[in-house]
Image (tube, grey):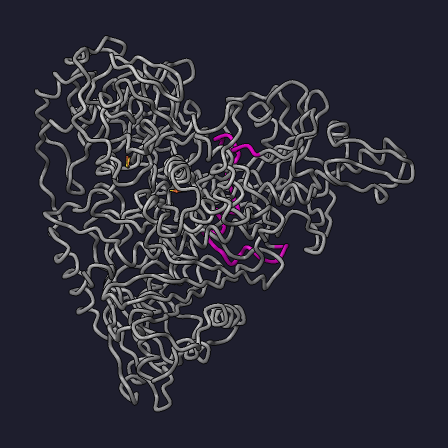
Amino acid sequence: MSEQTDIPEVAPETADETAKPERSRAAKWSRRGFIGAGVLAGGALLIGVGVRPGNPVGKLSPLVAGGTGEELVNSWVKIGADNIVTAIIPHCEMGQGAHSVLAQMLADELDADWSQVEVMQAPTDGSYVVSDTARMFVAPFTMNAADWIEPTWEGLFTQIGRFADVMITGGSSSIRSTGQYQMRVAGAAARKMLVGAAADEWGVPASEIVTRDSTLIHEASGNSAPYSEFAAAAAEQPMDHSPKLKDPKDYRLMGKSKRRTDIPAKVNGTADFGIDAKIPGMEPSDLSYAAVRRPPIPGTSVVSMDAETAKGMPGVQQILNMGSFIAVVADGYWNAQQALNTITAEYSDSESPIKSTADQFAAFANALDAAGDDGGEKAAGRGNAQSAYAEAATKIEAEYKAPFLAHAPMEPINCTASVKDGKCDIWTSTQVPLMARSAAAKALGMDADAITVHHPFLGGAFGRRLENDYVTMAVRIAKATSYPVKMIWSREEDTQKALYRPADLSRFKGGLDAGGKLIAYNNVFTQRHDPAEASVPGIYDIPNTSIRVAEADLHLPFSAWRSVDHSQQGFFIESFIDEAAHAAGADPLEYRLNMLGANTERHRGVLEKVAQLSNWSAPGAEGIGKGVAIVESFGTVAAEVIEVDMTSGKPKLLNVWAATDAGYVMNPDGFRNQIEGGIVFGLTAALYGEIDIVGGAAKQSNFHDYKMLRMNETPAIEVAIINSGTVPVGGAGEPGTPPAAPALANAIFAATGKRLREMPFGKQFA
Amino acid sequence: MRVFAIPAAALATLTLSACGGSDVQEPVEQIVVAEPGEAASYPGADEPAQTASDPEQASE
Amino acid sequence: MITFTINGKTERVDADPAMPILWVVREKLGMTGTKFGCGIAQCGACTVHLDGEPIRSCSMPLGAAEGRAITTIEGVSGEDGELNAVQQAWISEQVPQCGYCQSGQIMAATALLRDNPAPTDEDIDAAMSGNICRCGTYKRIRQAIKVAAGIEQATDEETAA
Ligand code: FES
Ligand code: FES
């Protein structure tokens, strides 16, 4: 359906830059606003795709137009006088390679010369709200909604997106939402307009013009020209709002392992992360630095501090009691931290009844006891799990525990801020730059338009940098001092005052019929956040299920942690399925295959693939075991087999084989890197991850007691990719993580007969 | 299926930004010791270098 | 005043001799390729060479650098910025994810290969296990070290699929 419509009016370049976006326009939004195009002074063509209701291209152009002679072709792509195509990417780069892959998708549709493609991070402007990302979070099922429903949904979701300032990099969503629905459309539409302009100029049919390597070619007449030559003329062309996208057979860049564009800067020290922020016009040695300490127990505040010693310490400039935290500002981070270490403080009393890990798990157990076999809130279910259980030939019961976990990104939390002359500049690593801006605006009582967020590379995030607690702290410090300050958290602060992956307790009762089939599945746990379906063993055909949540409060604050609820639920569910297989006397992988329900071709595919990769049926040596687990998360199905050597009495990881199906993988090598990383992340949690509560505070503090998997412990990892479709339906960043812990627990069981129902496993063999 | 499955993290922020108002909080206590650029003096800066920490050890 | 060379250039710094080298390099000299990860010699993000030996700059006082030579990630490339074999292998094997740990990883690997041009897996474990990568790129680091050593062939862009 190629729907030709009039070119929407574009705000002229002279538009009042400070004008507020009209929020009410969202309600009147129509499909034609989804792609907006128009002519700028000077004759350049502008296209904005899925940016927001209205036509923001005029407002954005000064932000992305760089040198002279450059023309903005659309909000997502810029063609310079040198014919360099710049892809303007609305997502942050935190190691997932999204910048490169999104550029690949755009450049492929545009037929751009890949060696002449550059990537630019979109400016932090409300116009870059990622509506498809917002929409995927809010109602994933509408992503493939019939076309007629799009206008309604799109208008609604763009509005929601603006409201929440969603410029979000999370939920493994960059490629499948922004890439599939925006970058490709932008590239294809721009290409079509360039072709149209060349056809008019050369007096030849557009259909005879081919595009290749950023060049327009008409063989018969011998004409050819670089894209840059027609960028301005293309503006006069009618715009196709639904340009035809390439068939997979015509992909030249998509589906290929193109090298990531962000990597060269990451091997020579030139990549700038948030912590490396430099203030323009200021020597790094003139900058001020803050070390901070929040009260050790969540929800308490600083009543008073004794800073007598700190006042006399070298380099100290200011000492601040901000109520919710203490800050020392000095001429360097180390001096600030040394001074902070000497400060003693009194904190308010905590109202939480929970003082220890045991208290927390007792609270969970109380909630589960109260819910019993049919209490709590129903999360999912069918049939009658209780009566089926009563009549089952074999009954099994299990209780699993998962601890609190910190994200521990390699780059400690930090934020640099300058607040003066009614303006605020922020430099920080964030997954949500627009939300960071809103948070700063609130903390400062300033208008968001007066705030600029500069967001360079992220040194890891894993969900931690969806939060803005640290941005608020930094701007408050900078406001109090009235000069720029770089706030850096110590690793201890990062680990002990984090927002954690929730701990949980999950109880199961299962019933098998005489043939060993799982016919009753009754499960209750206390934590349900996102995604809602994480607790549902939906891939299996179990006739009677009851899945319930009996909510219990968490003492420590929580946030999304790589794969979110799948990180605990994957362990619970796939361990319990393994226990059922054992009770049935069946091979665990066969048992899973036999239990797969309707619409599980992709699940069958990955299980069969991983069986083959791992040589599953070959008998293992004494003390060596293999375990399997399969979890679908964020649209990707991942099955993993882990081989562990238990002969020394402690787990030694030998091999991990993973088979994955994300629909269609845009960059196989980049995808594999993400899955490999997700597996190591999952194994770190499985073996070591644990945040305890002692005296109401988080106990672990740094990498000596919050341990990470290291080189000598990392197994060989092999990742297979199955492309069962033609478009990406699944993400890459998170799906590798959930199967790792259950596959390892199941492997240890296979090797030793010891069933591990509590994470982490490492200390249980100490 | 719950329709409104915004990640809890995003939702928290959504709620915050939706409820308007401002969170402005001034410091409870502010001790100004020196201005940036005022020379910091390092006792011992002119003394012979100390090598208390063994490089071999620290690299482990 | 402490005097030392950094990437071949002589520097005189007026700072507390007890201040760790990491902060002098990052904040006084403005060279931010060397990273802060833990501050207690646990993660290796801050690895630099002191007289050629890899050290944890977060835990080494400035005073220890007096009269000695520091090399950082900014100083391991060739004269005109040409990447060394380790850096090239890091690209061919597409090692980094977030990249934050990689300066330290490359400093550790560069020292390993200088002393041991054909490291075994055990040698790699011994030299590299002090460096944490939270993104989990260990498999690729191992492979890249072997490529830099000439033990394995570099993966090229077209065959990576
Ligand atoms: S920052 Fe020096 S070892 Fe971690
Ligand atoms: S690449 Fe992110 S910590 Fe190593």
Residue A147 to residue A83: above or below: below
Residue drawn where x is 55% and y is 37% of the image: A261
Where's residue A700, x and y in %? Answer: 19, 46
Q: Nearer the viewer, residue A46 or C20?
A: C20
Q: Which residues are magenta?
A: A119-148
Among all residues in the image, which is located at the extreme top?
B38
Where's residue A171, x and y in %? Answer: 44, 50
Residue drawn where x is 18% and y is 10% of the image: B46
Q: Quadrant of ligand 1?
A: top left
Q: Nearer the viewer, residue C74 or A469?
A: C74
Residue drawn where x is 56% and y is 48% of the image: C155
The quarter holding residue A451 reads: top left
Q: Majority secondary structure of the magenta segment?
A: helix
Where's residue C108, x and y in %? Answer: 36, 38
Judge whether residue A730 can be spotted in this image.
yes
Judge whether residue B26 can be spotted in this image.
no
Say whether residue A140 is magenta.
yes
Describe residue C97's horizontal placement relative to residue A558 as left or right. Answer: right
Tell me the quarter of the image containing the C terminus of chain A. bottom left
Where's residue A458, x and y in %? Answer: 41, 37
The quarter holding residue B52 reads: top left
Describe residue A418's horizontal placement relative to residue A100 as left or right. Answer: left
Residue C120 to residue A427: above or below: below
